[in-house]
Structures are given as structure tokens and as C-alpha cells.
Image (cartoon, helix red, strand yellow):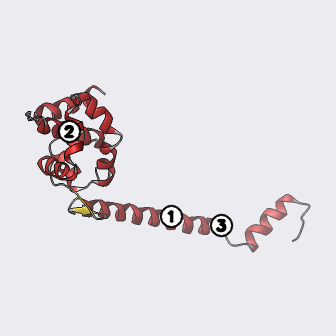
Amino acid sequence: MLVFSNPTYACIHRRKNKPPYMKLYLKIFFILVLGISCHASAQKDKKDDLSKKDSIDGVYIPANLDDCIRHIDAMWSDSVKNEVMKMTEEEFISRAHFGFGLWMRNNWGLWAGSRLAVYFNGIGIFHPDDMSAIILTSYYRKLKGENIRLDEQVKYYQNYWKKQ
């Protein structure tokens, strides 16, 4: 490598003999933009696909709240149901939120735009924590022979988000 004592000469010399970096930077920039846009498009397609699937990775995705209640009832043994019946509604919801509630949010695609998430979006519920809470509350009430009062539950979460 040549060492130049005159900095002005060194800059001129580099500009004449080396390829312009601007073209390289632009190529890299366009490749990155193209890659990001392709990735975003693929993610959108993947999300659209999940909204139409009845299962994700072999796990059945309920179509609506009634389907959730039927599915949970079929999944849980009588002994689990008996334990749930011994709890208050608040106790059950708080205990189940980070256990079975988390399982529902992850495995039923509530974060990923599954058909169940689309159902909840259609009734005005958009956060997966709210979706799982409504499912758990409704299951508990159904198990106890009570009216699930879905409209009341939906309004509760909508009002919560309006205040935020």
C-alpha cells in the first residue's frame, strides 16, 4: 500500500483508482429492503393461512367460544372439572391464566391470528390475554351451570382498553 504525505493527493488518488462505495452501499440497501419486504409479505401470508386452518402443528383450533367450551370439556377429566368446581371464579381465572391460559394463547394461535383470534376480533376483542380470560370465564360459568354473559365480558375488556 502506498503512503502519501499529502492528504489531498491521497483523497484524489483513492477516488480515481477505487470503485465508488456509493454503488456498493446502494446495492446493499436495496437488497436489505427487498429482503425485509419479502419477509413481511411471507409473514402476512402465513398469518392469513392460520386464520383459515382448523389446526396448527397438530393442535385443533376451535372456531368460536362454544367450540372452545366443548373442546375444553372433552380435554379435561372429571377430576380436573371437580377441582375447578371447588374454586371461586376469580380463583380459577387467576390460577389458570399463566397455565392453561398460556397454553391456549400459544397453541390456539391467539397471538398469531388463528381462526379463533379472528372470531374474537369479530366480536371486538383484540388482545390474546382478554381472549383467554373470556374463554376461561365462560368455561367456568358453563361448568357451574351459569349464563356466560358474553356481552358483559366483551364490554368489560372494551371499556378497559378505552380507559388506557
User: Which residue corresponds to mark 1?
Assistant: 32
Query: How far, Cα to Cα, is label 1 from label 2?
Result: 56 Å
The residue positioned farthest toward the front in the image shown = 79
Question: Which residue appears at 16% of the width and 33% of the height?
Answer: 153
Name the residue type under label 3: Tyr
Q: Is residue 99 left or right of residue 147?
A: right
Q: Nearer the viewer, mark 2 or mark 3?
A: 2
Q: Can you tell which mark lies on residue 82?
A: 2
Quarter in which the C terminus is drawn: top left
Query: How far, Cα to Cα, is label 2 from label 3?
Result: 71 Å
Name the residue type under label 2: Asn
Name the residue type under label 1: Leu
Query: How far, Cα to Cα, is label 3 from label 1?
Result: 16 Å
User: Which residue corresponds to mark 3?
Assistant: 21
Q: Nearer the viewer, mark 1 or mark 2?
A: 2
Task: Say whether residue 126 is visible.
Answer: no
Q: Write down the quadrant of residue 98 in the picture.
A: top left
* Proximity of marks 2 and 3: CB atoms separated by less than 8 Å: no
Q: Residues within 10 Å of mark 2 (few under 14, many from 20)?
A: few
Task: Say whether residue 138 is visible.
Answer: yes
Q: Nearer the viewer, mark 3 or mark 1?
A: 1
* Rendered view: 102 above or below 144: below
- Measuring from the top left, give residue 155's x and y in whole percent: 16, 31
Q: Element at badge 3?
A: helix
Question: Which residue appears at 25% of the width and 28% of the height?
Answer: 90
Q: Element at badge 1?
A: helix
The residue positioned farthest toward the top in the image shown = 163
